[in-house]
Amino acid sequence: MGYQFDADTAVSGDDGRWSATLTDDWSIASGVPNGGYLFAVALAAAGQVVPEQRLITATAHYVRPGQDGPADLAVEPVKRGRLTSTVAVALNQDGKERVRVVATYGDPALQDAPVEHPIPAPAIASPDECRSTHSELALAIGATIAERFDYRVLPVSRWVGGEGPGEARIDGWIRFADGREPDLAALPFFVDAFPPALGELVGPVTVPTLELTVHVRKQPAPGWVQARIEARHIAPGLVEEDAYLWDSTGELVALSRQLGLWRP
């Protein structure tokens, strides 16, 4: 069975020049693709350079908003090494650079080693005890990403009509709506797939991403991914947001930090 995420992040080409077609099925507003989706497409091209290694860390700088339609990806191998390799990618549309990504890949043994000081998953209600965030409002503004994932958040969340947790934090669960299991390719998208955590504190808000860094720790087990998204350093116009993802066995599989512009 083919899954939509794999089809919509597919790239073709060689010798450092790759192409993709961005669809409107992962948008945060009509015609505006989610930043995590752009990240995933860029990393799909970067990974072609070092297929024997796994993604360890990657940073995306969002130069301009992306758009639906064709994209060209210029891939530059910065360093090829036995233990780690670094690859840079520029995602371009209509002759303009939209996203610049630098990614480091490494020997799979780096992620397979036992964890000595794990970050435990917080104890929260199970997915069945949480509430779905499927929103008619999201679909009305063209946020088609709301249909691509199955979200479950705590009933206190403002996104499901609660009073809010009293801080800029979202605790919940995520999985693909079509049954695709999580993997290393999906994790950089998952960290940016939730609504802004700042909204839990200040109400409806938009937070365009300036920079997003993700660290991938482990291949996730099948099943739900538990997420905690939180913003703790909030300044006028700027906010830093941290995300933590644990797989169905409670293992930390990814963590990220992003800097965004925010406005009500």
Image (cartoon, rainbow, N blue to C red):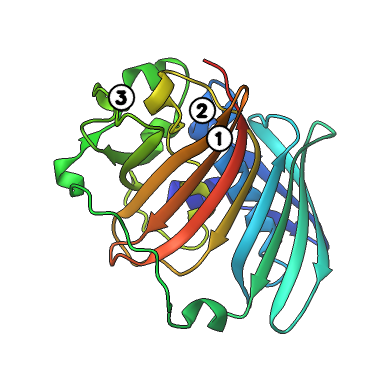
> Disc 2 on helix, strand or loop?
strand
Q: Quadrant of the N terminus?
A: bottom left
Tag 3: amino acid: Arg
Q: Earlier in the sequence, mark 2 or mark 1?
A: 2
Callout in the foreground (2, 3) = 3
Q: Earlier in the sequence, mark 2 or mark 3?
A: 2
Q: Residue 96: where, in percent of width, then height?
A: 83, 33
The residue closer to the viewer here, 213 or 13, is 213
Q: Is residue 119 above or below residue 143?
A: below
Asked whether residue 208 is in view, the answer is: yes
Q: Mark 2 points at which residue?
A: 28
Left or right for 74, reference 248: right
Q: Is residue 138 above or below residue 16?
A: above
Q: Mark 3 points at which residue?
A: 158
Tag 1: amino acid: Asn
Q: Are marks 2 and 1 in contact (CB under 8 Å)?
A: yes
Q: Name the residue under label 1.
A: 34
Q: In this view, does 63 lie above or below 17?
A: above
User: Between marks 2 and 1, how big is the CA–CA gap?
Assistant: 5 Å
Q: Which residue is drawn at 56% across and 47% down?
A: 257
Mark 2 crowd level (few <14, some 14–19, many ≥20, 10 Å Cα): many
Q: Do the residues labelled 2 and 3 touch (CB within 8 Å)?
A: no
Q: Residue 190: where, in percent of width, then height?
A: 46, 48
